[in-house]
Amino acid sequence: MTDDSDGTRLPASIAAAWGVRERPGKGPKPGLSLERIVEAGVKVADADGIGAVSMSRVAADLGVSTMSLYRYVSAKDELLTLMVDAAYGLPPAAQAAGERWRDALSTWAWTELALLRRHPWILRIPISGPPLTPNAIMWLERGLRILGGTGLAESEKLSVMLLVTGFVRNSATQTTDIHEAAVKSGSTVQDVMTAYGRTLAKLIDPERFPALTVGIASGALEDDEDEFGDSEFRFGLERVLDGVDRLIDSRG
């Protein structure tokens, strides 16, 4: 850990990621670095899932001893944090001149959704606290800048970003879970939802569940041909942004 003058403590690897602490000058093997370790971890997670990531597996893929990694990362949890940051990368491009905040924030949300689909293992790592790594902070910074001219209070801007990223993560988790379950059963998401509707139709009593009966009869569970639920995400995101829009209007 590193101590700052104000008493805050950072894991050495996080400090190194920010460039506020020098990395080991010479690793146990020439060319070994924090960046290579994190990159190797991401490759393992992308290929085999987060459950396959271990210090020993990453070391083996790099051709070094497990103990050599501990000069750069003190624990697996630190490695996972840095892997998530690396997978996120930089946020979408800065808001274009004249671009509405709503369009820019929508792009921000769709970009986050896309990267979570590319790296679904991120969703399996519990959130242990506020963002602290460089790329995560850049994503937050970009979102706050988008809201810069809205007239919202600073606390409200932070709350909006928490709301939007929470919606994105929840949507990504739901669609990923359903998609993975469908793949395991050798079917598609649409097959799963169609079978779900038919099963419910056999189970429910129309007098007890009149609204759901009407919904099933309408084909509402069968009319989405999008395997990853883009239409549902679009609908939900627009409703979230509608609420933010009204809040901004209320601020004059």
Image (cartoon, helix red, strand yellow):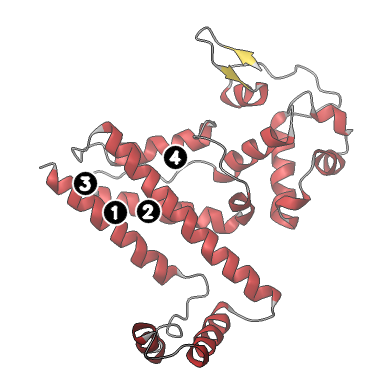
Structural crowding at the residue carrying mark 4, measured as other residues with C-alpha within 10 Å and reported as few (<14), some (14–19) or many (≥20): some
Can you tell which of label 1 and label 3 is closer to the viewer? 1
Q: Position of residue 52 (x, y in %)?
A: 78, 51
Dots 1 and 2: beta carbons under 8 Å? Answer: yes
Q: Position of residue 66 (x, y in %)?
A: 86, 33
Q: Amino acid at mark 4?
A: Trp
Q: Which mark is residue 103?
A: 1
Q: Which mark is residue 107?
A: 2
Along the line of sight, the residue nearer the viewer: 171 or 198: 198
Q: Position of residue 211 (x, y in %)?
A: 34, 83
Point 41% across, 87% down: residue = 216
| Mark 3 secondary-structure assignment | loop
**Is residue 188 toward the left or the right of residue 160 in the image?**
right
Q: Earlier in the sequence, mark 1 or mark 3?
A: 3
Can you tell which of label 3 and label 4 is closer to the viewer? 4
Q: Which residue is mark 4?
A: 139
Q: CA distance from mark 4 to mark 2?
A: 12 Å
Q: CA distance from mark 1 to mark 3?
A: 11 Å
Q: Amino acid at mark 3?
A: Gly
Q: Which mark is residue 98?
A: 3
